[in-house]
Image (spheres, coloured by chain):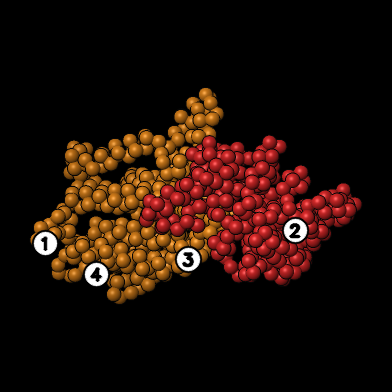
Chain colours: A red, B orange
Amino acid sequence: MRDEIVLATHGLTRRFGGLVAVNDVDFDVKANEIHAILGPNGAGKSTLINLLSGEIPPSEGQVLYRQQPIQGKSARQIARMGIGRSHQKTNIFPRLSCLQNCELAARIHMGGVFGSWRSRQTAQKVSERAQEVLDTCQLNHRAHTTASDMSYGEQRQLQIAMVLATAPSLMLLDEPMAGMGREETAQVTELLASLTDRYTLVLIEHDMDSVFRLADRITVMVDGCVLESGPTEQIRTSEKVRDVYLGRHDEGATA
Amino acid sequence: MLHRYPKRVAFIMLVLTALVAAFPLWGEAVFGNQANFMLEKLTLMLILALFAMSLDLLVGIVGLVSLGHALFFGLGAYTLALASPDFSPASMWWMLPLVMGVSACVALIVGVLVIRTKGIFFIMTTLAFGQMLYYFISTSQFAGGTDGVFIMFRPSLALGERTLVDLDNPYSFFYFCLGMLLLGYFFLRWLTRSYFGQVLDGIHDNEHRMQALGYATSGYKLVAFVIAGVMAAVAGMLAAMQYGFANPAQLGWHTSGEVLMMLILGGMGTIFGPILGAFAYEILLYLYEHATTHWPILMGLTIIAAVLVLPRGIAGLIIAPPWRRKRQTASEAVSEKENASIATSAQPVTQRKEN
C-alpha cells in the first residue's frame, strides 16, 4: 500500500508562448507520503500544481492519477475523483461562516445538495464531517464566525479544512503557510504532519524548516526542470540544491 | 450570517405590508375619488415587486446580470392572452400551471444556451434572446403584432361552482396579487437560506472555487435561471390580467432595464430590497410624470444619485443605517466590523469577485 504510486507525470511540459514554464517533468507521488516541491520563484512550481490538478492542460506529456489520465476532465470531475487542492491565494467564501464553508465542501461529496435536502440523515452527516475537520484544524472555536472576520492565518487554515472536508485521497497544497506568522506556521506544520496516515500530500512551500520537517520526499525545480528529486535527507545534503539556494546558479532565481 | 437581517427589517416590512393590505380602509380617506385609480397602481406595484424579486435571484444572489428578464414577463402575459378562450373565462387552476410550464420550458432552453457565458457576455446573450422574442412577437399575426392581444375575460379562481376569489373585482384581485407576492417572497427566503441557496452564494462569491470543490455550477445556475423565469412569468400573467392585454412592450429590453433599476434602487441580493425598489421606482415615476414631461431626466438623475449615495440601495439603508454606523465607529471598531459584514450581503453591482 505504502509504495503504491498515486500520481505520476510523464514528460509533462507546459509552454506559455515562448516561455517553457514546466519542461519535461517526470514526477511521482506515493500513497501516504508528503511530497514537497521546492524551487526559487518562477521555477514553475505553481504551474506544475495547476497541471497536476487539471486546472490547465499540458502542452505535452500527461498526468496519471491512479493510472488514469486526468486530461480532458473538468475541474469538477477531477475533484470528484479525489484530488483536492488549495490555492496560493486565500480562496474561501467570505460571507459564509467557518462551519458553512466546510459544510459546503463536505456536502458535494456526501450525496450533494439535493441529498441533504431530502434526508435529515445526510444533513447530519455533512455537519458532523464539517465539525470533524474543524476539530482537526483547531478551528472549532470559530465555527460560527463569518469567514471574512477571521484572521489571515485562520483563513488559511480554513482553506485546508475545506480541502479536508471533501475527503480527498490526494491533497495538493499551494503554499499553505504563505504569509503566516511563526506560531501559525508551527501549528499548520503540525496539522499537516498529523494527516499523513490518511492522506497523500503534494506540498509547495517556501518555509524550508517546515519542508524538511514534513516531507518524505522532495523534488527541487529550477527553470521548469527537475533539478533533483529524492528522499529528504538526500536533498538536504545535495550539493546541487545548495548551489541553487545559495545563489551560485542564479539565472533561475530571478526569473 | 448570510440572508439573516436585523429585527428592524422584519418590523419595517411587516408595517409596510400591513399598510398596503389595509389600503381599502384608508385609501378613500386619503385619495378621495382617486382611490380606485390608486388601488390599480398599488396592484401594479405588487406585481412589479414580484417581477423585481425574481430578477434578484439571478442578479443579487447568483451574480448573473440579465438584461433579458422581460422575456419571461412578456411570455407569461402572452401565454395568458393566447390561451384564454374568447367567450368564457379560463380557470386559474390550469392557467397558472400552463404559464409556469411554458415559461419553465423556455427558461430551460434559453438557460442552457446562455448559462455558459459570464459577465458582459451573459448580459448580451440574455438581451439578444429577449429582443429575438420581442421582434418575433411584434411582427407575428397570431400575436396581434405591435397591438398585442386583448384578454376578454380574466381567469377565474373557482372550486366547482363556487368562486373562491373574484378576480374581476379590483379589491380581490389586489389581495390575490398581494398573496402571490408574499408567496414568492417566502419561497425565495426559504430558497436562499437552504443548502441550494448556499451553493448559489458560493457561486456568486467564487464560482471557480465551487468547481474545484466538485460542484457542477452550471446546473445550479440553470435551476436558478428557470426559477427566476417562472416567477417572472407569473408576474407577467398578473400584469396582463391587470391591464387586460398583452403587449410587445412587456417583452422589450426597456422593461428589463426598468426592473434592473428597481433592483439597484432597492438593494440587490436581499430579496426584500427589490420589493421596496419596485414601490420606490413606481412612486417616483408617478411623481415625475406628473411634474414634467421630461421625467426621464429626473429619473436618470435619481438613479445616479441612488447609486452614488446608496450603493446598497434602500435595503442597505435599513440593514445598516448610516447614523448607527457612525455611532459604532466612535465607540468600538469591532462591532463596526460585524455590522459591515452584515451589510455586505446587500451588494452593489460593481463589486465582482475575481477567480
Q: Amino acid at mark 3?
A: Val
Which residue is the site of mark 1? B160
Alpha carbon distance from label 4 to label 2? 63 Å
Pointers 3 and 4 in contact (C-beta within 8 Å): no
Residues behind callouts 4 and 2 on a single chain:
no
Pointers 2 and 3 in contact (C-beta within 8 Å): no
Residue furthest front as drawn = A1
Secondary element type, mark 4: helix
Q: Position of residue B203 (x, y in %)?
A: 50, 54
Location of residue B111 (image quadrant): bottom left
Residue found at x 83% / y 56%: A252
Q: Amino acid at mark 1?
A: Gly
Select label 3 or label 4 by which is in front. Answer: 3
Alpha carbon distance from label 3 to label 4? 28 Å
Alpha carbon distance from label 2 to label 3? 36 Å
Alpha carbon distance from label 1 to label 3? 43 Å
Which residue is the site of mark 2? A44
Above or below, B207 relative to B42: below
Pick the residue in front: B179 or B296.
Answer: B179
Of pointers 1 and 3, the one earlier in the residue sequence: 3
Q: Amino acid at mark 4?
A: Ala
Q: Position of residue B228 (x, y in %)?
A: 38, 58
Q: Say which mark, if any, is on residue B276.
A: none
Secondary element type, mark 1: loop
Select label 1 or label 3 by which is in front. Answer: 1
Alpha carbon distance from label 2 to label 1? 74 Å
Query: Which chain is home to disc 3?
Result: B
Residues behind callouts 3 and 4 on a single chain:
yes
Secondary element type, mark 3: helix
